Image: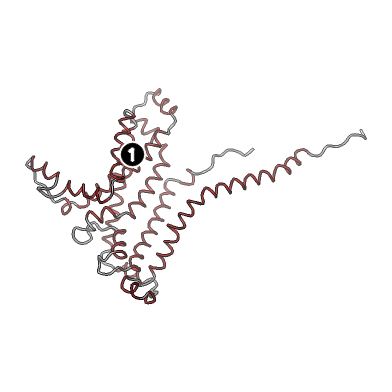
Amino acid sequence: MGGEISSPPITRTRSAAGAPPRRRARSRGHLIAYGFMAPAGLLVLLFFLIPVVLIVFLSMTDLAHSNFTTDLTRMNFVGLANFQRLLSDQFVGKIFFNTVFYVLFTLALFNVGLALVISLLTVHINRRAGMFFRALWILPRITPVIVYILIWRRLIAEPPFGIIAQFNSMLGQATPNYITDMPWIVVILVNGFIGASFGMIIFTSAIESIPKDLMNASLVDGSTAMQRIRYVILPLLRWPLLFVVTYQTLSLLTSFEQILVLTNGGPGLYRTEVWALTAYHRALSTYFGNAQWGYGSAFALVLVAIGVVMAVIYMRVFRFDELVAEPKIEDL
């Protein structure tokens, strides 16, 4: 009894000895994660945060082509004068409505709607045939903008040059001037065929990554193709849908190359002018006789604010925090 040696508390010793290595491993894991995120963070800093700061500064100045090329010191700080001028512009309402119309219809009909339809159709046919049709839809995206718009202009040109006009003449049908009579249809089609390819790739990858056991179980239960799409595939596409909708909304808000080359905001006065194109016309072209960098920066800053607000709304609607939440597994 008296010679027995009491052993130290094993549990406490293990805990004290095991805690520092666990903390070191966790810190090492955090450092590795930050290391992987560093390149993306650097890109965001260089190509988003710093440009936004510069745009905020420029939007509060009267910097224009005339005083910049002669003497930079002639640039004056004007505060919110550019934004007051923007709000009092009689065409701002029309340009804003054009932007909402363009983004909403192109996004719903093509960038998400048509992309999802193409993905669902091509994964339910022969694999090689599906890959062939998806490759055809990628062609508009990899074609240079100038070449792509020239193809469209050749298609919809007035008689006797337009390809569609020649077919109409063979059928005895009149050919309208598509650019003048229905410019928005042409603009949405031109941009939609480009945008559909991106969502198609994302949705196809997501559908093909669905476990085969789920699809086989639905087949055993006697489900039809439409029932599998509705009850198996679509519920599992919430994350890809969030990504495509958010990315394509921001892309459409800031893209204007196709509209610039196709209609340049016309025909007429601001008929197909969108917000990003207006910022370009004000700041970086002689469309108004003088490049107004300060005023154009005000338009660009409003566009940045709209994009941030839309991204936050999408993340709330799709419950982004639940999608990226860690699995609820206890750490033993």
Q: Give x and y (percent) for residue 159.
A: 10, 48
Helix, strand or loop at mark 1: helix
Q: Give x and y (percent) for residue 143.
A: 28, 46
Q: Quadrant of residue 201?
A: top left
Label 1 neighbour load within 10 Å: few <14, some 14-19, many 20+: many
Q: Is residue 301 left or right of residue 172?
A: right
Q: Amino acid at mark 1?
A: Leu
Front residue of 91/26: it is: 26
Front residue of 35/57: it is: 35
Q: Is residue 223 above or below residue 199?
A: above
Q: Give x and y (percent) for residue 138.
A: 31, 41
Q: Is residue 191 above or below residue 4?
A: below
Q: Is residue 34 left or right of residue 8?
A: left
Front residue of 318/178: it is: 178
Residue depicted at x 36% and y 59%: 303
Q: Which residue is mark 1?
A: 116
Q: Is residue 273 left or right of residue 225?
A: left
Residue depicted at x 65% and y 46%: 24
Q: Give x and y (percent) for residue 226.
A: 33, 31
Quadrant where the image shows the C terminus: top right
